[in-house]
Amino acid sequence: MPDRNASKSVFASRKSVFCFFTMTSILFVLSWFFVIRSAARPNFIDNNLLSTSESISVIDRNVESSIGNRAVLVDNEKEETTRETQTTHEKDDDGVKCSSSNKLGLKVFMYDLPPEFHFGLLDWKPEGKSVWPNIRTKIPHYPGGLNLQHSIEYWLTLDLLASEFTQARKAPSVIRVHNSSEADIIFVPFFSSLCYNRYSKMNPHERKSINKVLQDKLVKYVTAQEEWKRSGGKDHLVLAHHPNSMLDARTKLWPATFLLSDFGRYPPNIANVEKDVIAPYRHVIRSYVNDNSTFDSRPILLYFQGAIYRKDGGFARQELFYLLKDEKDVHFSFGSVLKGGVSKATEGMRSSKFCLNIAGDTPSSNRLFDAIASHCVPVIISDDIELPYEDVLDYSQFCIFVRTSDALKENYLINFMRSIGRDEWTRMWNKLKEIENFFEFQYPSKEGDAVQMIWQAVARKVPAMRLKLNRSRRYTRSLPSTSKEEGIKSIPAPGNFW
């Protein structure tokens, strides 16, 4: 009798375990069913953001550090420079529908500013009501000399105008649109660097220089536009390549993205590497075409010619002058663009293995880009320098970086330069010839030149612009009035202060 009861007990126990296992399996299957179903639901994500994000996803790969260089660098060879297919919306009789545009460039809306802000500064006179020159018949001439180094605004504006009728490009970097709601960015075509170079000095009868007057007028014009009011300027692009070109207007237009040469004269709350774009100088000396030089055919080890005594961060120049002036294979002397200075610099750089790029009044100078054009390996001694398109270009492959504190140690720099042999120098020299086109400004622009590289750098800022803009709209609704006599005042949106 006890054995029979024990047998029944064991059977009941096995039955309970089987039921428990069955129920657990059913619940497990159901849970996966709901997970798969929820994953199939559509996500409310802007396809434009996805296309732009995919084009810069290379930044997250192949990250490496460079000695003496604070920035994150990536392998440029793996960068995808063509933006993927974007989705645009157009209306038909039934409402809104989606249509694909294959490989569109950055869509830019440009303000039709009066000519006094752009080509009028080049003494161009408009014909009729148009504020823009007909660049298919005649292109206004830009002044030469040192004016050229900060001429970025001129080349970008020409490229934007040409985008409307140039059909030759397979994958354009930029497209001008006339409806601001379709644009990725809003372009402010003020030739600020040229304005500073030509009109920053006051005449005896003037209270303000023309440069300051135009900056005041620019702020009034731009901030009065619906595009600015809609975004608070967060999707605007303002050109201020010369370090002194927008010292007045920048305090009013700082929510916009600035196109700069460096941050030397900008406080971080006005301009910074997360918000703004660094663009190259246009080199002043001629490009070295058909360069067949070798390590041994360039007799000068280290070359510098320019202003030696500078203020601010430029103290290193005079210190290095005293350290290097007696070295037999070093050229370190004062120079300027006057009296054939450009020709002398061209000859000197082409005869040198390494060219010094030392911080001056600001961290950067066009000397770096003159060296690149000469295939003279740049030696950068500027701790606070920011470099163009460094998120996709590894400068350590063709530049030498030396910290200022190390360079000022006796014999450190000269011994370092002499330790670099023929093979290493030749590798960097070859790399300079590969990347030099990234720093060439030309009209019409060509794939991979400086103009298109700048537009692509701006395009990589678009997701961050949209993020800030979308965040700022979180609390834009105001409370409704409760009575006609005493309405509740609108509460300022916290997003507007972000």
Image (cartoon, grey):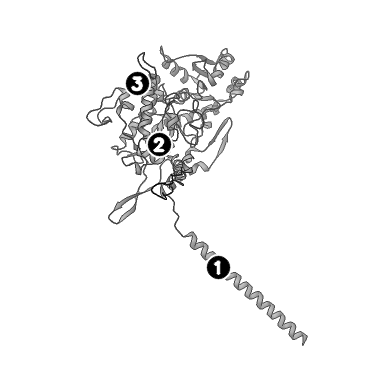
Q: Is residue 71 left or right of residue 205?
A: right
The answer to whether residue 185 is visible is no
Q: Is residue 63 left or right of residue 236?
A: right
Residue drawn at (29%, 27%) of the image: 139
Residue 252 occupies quadrant: top left
Distance between mark 3 and mark 1 Cα atoms = 74 Å
Neighbourhood count class around disc 3 (C-alpha, 10 Å): few under 14, some 14–19, many 20 upward: few
The answer to whether residue 249 is visible is yes
Residue drawn at (38%, 27%) of the image: 216
Task: State the residue position of label 2.
Answer: 236
The image shows residue 144 at horizontal and vertical percentages of 36, 20
Task: State the residue position of label 1.
Answer: 29
The image shows residue 108 at horizontal and vertical percentages of 36, 39
Residue in front for this viewpoint, 251 or 86: 251
Task: State the residue position of label 3.
Answer: 143
Residue 143 occupies quadrant: top left
The disc label shown at residue 415, or none: none
As drawn, the residue found furthest toward the right would be: 2
Distance between mark 1 and mark 2 Cα atoms = 52 Å
Q: Is residue 27 left or right of residue 180?
A: right
The image shows residue 341 at horizontal and vertical percentages of 43, 14
- Mark 1 or 2: the one toward you: 2
